Amino acid sequence: MLTDRRQRVLAALIHEYVAHALPVASRTLVEGYPLGVSSATVRNELSALEEDGYIQQPHTSAGRIPTDHGYRSFVDALLARADIDEDAETADAIRALRQSARELDELLDRTSSMLTQLTECLSIVLPARAAYLPLRSIGLSTLMQQPEFRSSLVLVPLLRMIEDDSLLMYINDAAGDDGPVVRIGHENGDESLDNVSVVASHFGSGADAGIIAIIGPTRMDYERAICAVEAARHALGEI
């Protein structure tokens, strides 16, 4: 269990890394975040976080980046917050789409496009009847702009999972029934997804439950993704 101060330092490092995709130096945290402690204390906290496996120092870089373990601690703290909730603006926008969409497939496609624009990740929104049909993904070109997916070693395995429908089957199994479930990197249990995080939920209930998923690098904006999926779950669950 992390102390409050150590959790704040970890959260600041993750926010900085998510924003810039570069290893984070202690000086950046001291100058850019209201941590209320000295630079020496921040360095000590970073050393402790690294020793405990929450962050790591890639190669000879002076900065550090989060590990899957660090992201998990951050996400668990997010999910435990009383104020983590749906993005009301997104939910209202999806409800407005319901009024203009001529059929369900159009509504889901437009919702997926909206989630892609909001999260800059791959977004999948599918009805129950499409659960095992070829996956139609929206936002792949956006995802490929992320630094992590410029490497074929990361991108190609994900593309293969999209093509053979195994990604669709995976998110259907991983999705939460009562809200978003977050799987981070190695937690996915498939080496093709070692560099990928998934935020997924069902909407509706029973045999009529559809799927909402945000798929992106482990360096995703988790709060934004969780709130977006929750908003879509509520808005589409009203259909």
Image: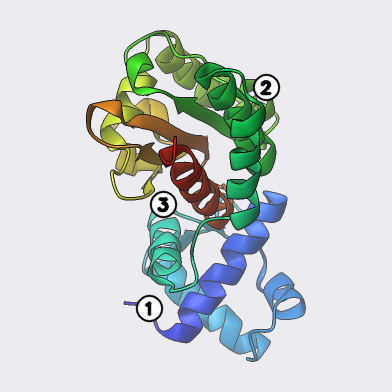
* Residue picked out by circle 2: 141
What's the residue type where badge 3 is placed?
Asp
Spot the residue most to the left. Answer: 206
Discs 2/1, front: 2
* Residue picked out by circle 3: 68
Q: In this orientation, does residue 62 appear?
A: no
State if disc 3 and disc 2 touch (CB < 8 Å): no
Residue at left offset 52%, top offset 22%: 153
Q: Quadrant of residue 71?
A: bottom left
Q: Earlier in the sequence, mark 2 or mark 3?
A: 3
* Residue picked out by circle 1: 2
Q: Secondary structure at mark 3?
A: helix
Q: Vertical placement of 85 versus 153: above or below?
A: below
Say which of 192 and 223 sits in front: 223
Q: Secondary structure at mark 1?
A: loop
Residue at left offset 60%, top offset 25%: 151
Spot the residue most to the right. Answer: 31
Residue 238 x %, y %: 44, 41
Q: Vertical placement of 173 versus 157: above or below?
A: below
Residue at left offset 49%, top offset 51%: 226
Q: Is residue 35 left or right of residue 158?
A: right
Q: Earlier in the sequence, mark 2 or mark 1?
A: 1
